[in-house]
Image (spheres, helix red, strand yellow):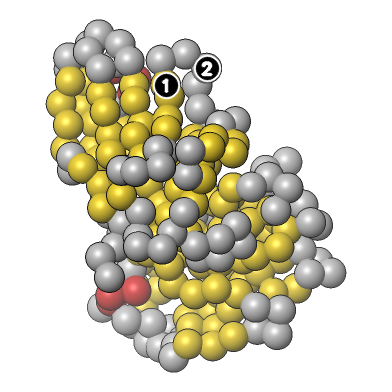
C-alpha cells in the first residue's frame, strides 16, 4: 500500500462548480500535512497547510481526519485558473522526508 | 527574500558525462530536499540534507548519484556517467524545520542525449 494515496482523477468540472479531493495516508505517526498545486512543467507550489481543526483560505478549505487518516481539499466556485495537479503531502517525522501523493489532475472547463 | 534558486534551469549532457545541479535554499532554511520527476509521473523523493549532513538518502540510486550540502554554498546533486533514463526534472525544496512547509525551486530539466 502506498504511503500517500489520492483520488485517481482526472476531474473535469465546469466553472463555478465545487470540487473535493481526498487523500489517505498509511502511517499514523504522520505529523504534518499540506496541499500543493503543480502546473504543467512547473514547480509545486504550496497551496495550504492542513491543521487538525481544519482551515480555510478564500475558496479553499482543508480538513484533517486523524482517526480515519485522511485529508481533504474543497474548492468552491472553481475558476479556470484552478486547473492544475493537486498534490497531497505528508510529513512523517521518523521518515524525515516529505512524502507526496501522485496527484489529482483538475481541469476547470469554461 | 529570494526564493529557492536552482541552476541551471536546463542542462543537456551526452551519455557518460557528469551533471551538476545546484540549489540555494531560501534564506534561513537549513533543510534541503531533492526530488525527481519523470515525464507524466509524480515527484519521487531522492535525498534530504541538512548543513553538512545527509539525513536520508533512501530515494537515491546507490550508484552514480551523490548529494552534498556544504557549510558554505549551495546544495549540489551530482550525477556521474549520465544515461538516457536520467532525463527528468530535478526539483529542490527547502524548509526551515522538519515539520514545516517546504518551498520549491523552479527545477533543473536534464536532458541526456
User: Which residue is at the front of the view, B64 or B36?
Assistant: B64
User: Which residue is at the front of the view, B75 or B58?
Assistant: B75
Q: Position of residue A83 (x, y in %)?
A: 33, 68
Of helix, strand and loop, which one carries label 2?
Answer: loop
On the same chain, marks 2 and 1? The answer is yes
Contact flag, marks 2 and 1 (Cβ < 8 Å)? yes
x 54%, y 35%: residue: B54
Q: Which mark is residue B45?
A: none
Q: Which mark is residue B62?
A: 2
Q: How many marks?
A: 2
Q: Mark 2 packing: few (<14 Cα in 10 Å), some, or many (20+)?
A: few
**Tag 2, which chain?**
B
Q: Position of residue B19 (x, y in %)?
A: 25, 24
Q: Position of residue A3 (x, y in %)?
A: 68, 47
Q: Mark 1 packing: few (<14 Cα in 10 Å), some, or many (20+)?
A: some
x 56%, y 60%: residue: B97
Instruction: Measure how far apart labels 2 and 1 are at the Cα level.
Output: 7 Å
x 42%, y 30%: residue: B67
Kindly indicate the quadrant of the structure image that contains residue B15.
Answer: top left
Residue ranking furthest to the front:
B71
In this figure, which residue is indicated by the disc labeled 1?
Answer: B65
Question: In this rendering, would B3 be left or right of A34?
Answer: left
x 52%, y 17%: residue: B62
Of helix, strand and loop, which one carries label 1?
Answer: strand
Image quadrant containing the C terminus of chain A: bottom left
Q: Position of residue B45 (x, y in %)?
A: 51, 40
Q: Please determine whether, in this image, residue A93 is positioned above or below residue B81.
A: below
Q: Is residue B91 visible?
A: no
Amino acid at each position: 500500500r502506498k504511503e500517500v494515496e489520492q483520488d485517481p482523477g482526472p476531474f473535469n468540472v465546469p466553472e463555478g462548480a465545487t470540487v473535493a479531493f481526498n487523500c489517505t495516508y498509511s502511517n499514523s505517526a504522520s505529523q504534518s500535512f499540506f496541499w500543493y498545486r503543480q502546473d504543467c512543467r512547473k514547480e509545486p507550489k504550496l497551496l495550504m497547510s492542513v491543521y487538525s481543526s481544519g482551515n480555510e483560505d478564500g475558496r479553499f478549505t482543508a480538513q484533517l481526519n486523524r482517526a480515519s487518516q485522511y485529508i481533504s481539499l474543497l474548492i468552491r466556485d472553481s475558476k479556470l485558473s484552478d486547473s492544475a495537479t493537486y498534490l497531497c503531502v505528508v510529513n512523517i517525522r521518523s521518515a524525515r522526508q516529505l512524502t507526496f501523493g501522485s496527484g489529482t489532475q483538475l481541469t476547470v472547463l469554461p | 527574500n529570494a526564493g529557492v534558486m536552482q541552476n541551471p534551469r536546463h542542462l543537456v549532457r551526452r551519455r557518460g558525462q557528469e551533471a551538476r545541479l545546484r540549489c540555494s535554499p531560501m534564506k534561513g532554511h537549513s533543510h534541503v530536499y531533492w526530488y525527481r520527476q519523470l515525464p507524466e509521473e509524480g515527484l519521487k523523493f531522492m535525498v534530504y540534507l541538512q548543513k553538512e549532513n545527509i539525513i536520508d538518502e533512501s530515494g537515491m540510486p546507490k550508484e552514480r548519484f551523490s548529494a552534498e550540502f556544504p557549510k558554505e554554498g549551495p546544495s549540489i546533486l551530482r550525477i556521474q556517467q549520465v544515461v538516457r533514463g536520467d532525463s527528468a526534472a530535478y526539483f529542490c525544496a527547502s524548509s526551515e524545520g522538519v515539520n514545516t512547509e517546504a518551498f520549491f525551486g523552479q527545477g533543473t530539466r536534464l536532458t541526456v542525449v
